[in-house]
């Protein structure tokens, strides 16, 4: 929907919202850069900060993803502890890697202590060697994810009363767990582009958070979820972008792609290609008007929240990363979400700039 001032709004007049991924490895994963990034993301008025997940990278994939990933729930807790407005989310937590009782406890703790600012993005995972290292079932990871999520939901909603679960992958009897999340459940946004992910999101999630589909594929996924749920009311339609780059006129940029590497393990086939705009450029790479047009195209397909990826880890420097966030906030985001902020954005920008000084 385009309002009278040309801003794209969500359903019922809601503004679009934007979050930012802080790479879990590389120069931005150092203590100082991490803290500065989180402070700046809040200061610039973004809605949330996101962290990806790997626990133990198998050697056959180490040339594609470095092993020193920060643990995402821990990173979320640190980010929540040093901010007052910003949400923090996992992009996405591989649910079969971790005991569901422990995840339920950690997520509820973060939710309560932050005033409900944690978003638990979850997915089934893809890296077979990582599953093997953790003793997790790669072949049944979809069913494991479903059963883990149902168990977590039961624990969060139990209000500390005895709870029992007896399924193939989760078994416990008369367990009492607290604290209860602030709204009774921790928000769960389900990642994934496949049919099983759509079903999981519709029937067990509070949002859908896939990896960079095309607008047409996003629209069809959204329609399938709404059909399964019977309504899109109260559900968040998000997406995680492959890359975000705001260019000046005449500047060029070619995103890194696994497709450029001749030695791609079969596991990595889960990732879709970077979507292209009608003019042939990668989506969300271009000058501000082009990025604004990309936002409008995806908003028309039903997206209401965008998780931006200014860096994949070591592809750009720290200063460039901060500059890109500033460019997007000033030249793109203000067109869509300025009035949704709790205070004047210029005051927030000043705070963000001070955080980096």
Image (cartoon, helix red, strand yellow):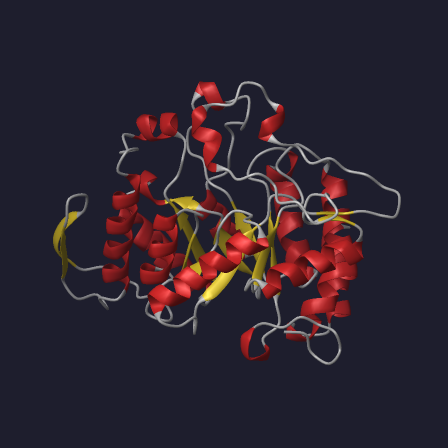
Q: Count the marks: how many?
A: 0
Measured as percent of width and height from the top left, residue 288 is found at: 79, 56
Q: Nearer the viewer, residue 89 or 282?
A: 282
Point 61% across, 67% down: residue: 16
Point 77% across, 63% down: residue: 350
Point 54% across, 27% down: residue: 66
Direction from residue 191 to residue 99 in the image, left or right: left
Image height of 143 relative to 343, above or below: above
Measured as percent of width and height from the top left, residue 111 is found at: 41, 62
Measured as percent of width and height from the top left, residue 315 is found at: 68, 33
Q: Is residue 314 visible?
A: yes
Q: Nearer the viewer, residue 195 or 183?
A: 195
**Within the image, what quadrant is residue 124 found in?**
top left
Measured as percent of width and height from the top left, residue 131 is found at: 33, 31
Q: Is residue 112 visible?
A: no
Image height of 321 relative to 40, above or below: above
Direction from residue 11 to residue 139 in the image, left or right: left
- Indicate the quadrant containing the N terminus: top left, top right, bottom left or bottom right: bottom right
**Within the image, what quadrant is residue 280 found in?**
top right
Point 22% across, 66% down: residue: 158
Residue farthest toward the right in the current orientation of the protein: 250
């Amino acid at each position: 929907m385009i309002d009278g001032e040309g801003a794209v709004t969500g359903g019922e007049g809601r503004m679009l919202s934007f979050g930012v991924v802080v790479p879990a490895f590389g120069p931005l994963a150092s203590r100082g850069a991490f803290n500065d990034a989180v402070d700046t993301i809040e200061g610039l008025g973004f809605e949330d900060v996101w962290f990806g997940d790997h626990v133990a990278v198998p050697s056959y994939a180490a040339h594609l993803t470095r092993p020193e990933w920060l643990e995402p729930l821990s990173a979320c807790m640190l980010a929540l502890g040093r901010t007052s407005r910003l949400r923090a989310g996992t992009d996405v937590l591989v649910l079969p890697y971790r005991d569901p009782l422990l995840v339920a406890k950690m997520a509820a703790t973060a939710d309560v202590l932050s005033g409900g600012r944690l978003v638990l993005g979850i997915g089934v995972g893809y890296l077979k060697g990582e599953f093997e290292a953790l003793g997790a079932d790669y072949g049944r990871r979809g069913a494991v994810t479903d059963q883990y999520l149902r168990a977590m939901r039961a624990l969060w909603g139990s209000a500390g009363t005895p709870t029992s679960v007896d399924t193939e992958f989760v078994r416990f009897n008369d367990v009492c767990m607290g604290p209860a999340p602030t709204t009774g459940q921790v928000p769960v946004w389900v990642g994934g582009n496949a049919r099983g992910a759509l079903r999981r999101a519709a029937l067990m999630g509070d949002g859908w958070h896939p990896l960079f589909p095309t607008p047409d594929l996003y629209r069809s996924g959204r329609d399938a979820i709404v059909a399964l749920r019977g309504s899109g009311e109260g559900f968040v339609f998000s997406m995680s972008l492959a890359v975000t780059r705001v260019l000046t006129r005449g500047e060029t940029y070619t995103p890194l792609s696994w497709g450029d590497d001749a030695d791609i393990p079969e596991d990595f086939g889960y990732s879709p290609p970077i979507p292209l705009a009608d003019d042939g450029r990668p989506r969300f790479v271009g000058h501000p008007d082009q990025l604004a047009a990309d936002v409008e195209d995806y908003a028309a397909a039903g997206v209401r929240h965008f998780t931006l990826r200014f860096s994949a880890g070591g592809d750009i420097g720290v200063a460039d990363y901060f500059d890109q966030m500033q460019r997007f906030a000033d030249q793109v985001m203000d067109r869509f979400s300025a009035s949704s902020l709790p205070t004047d954005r210029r005051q927030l920008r000043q705070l963000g700039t001070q955080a980096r000084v």
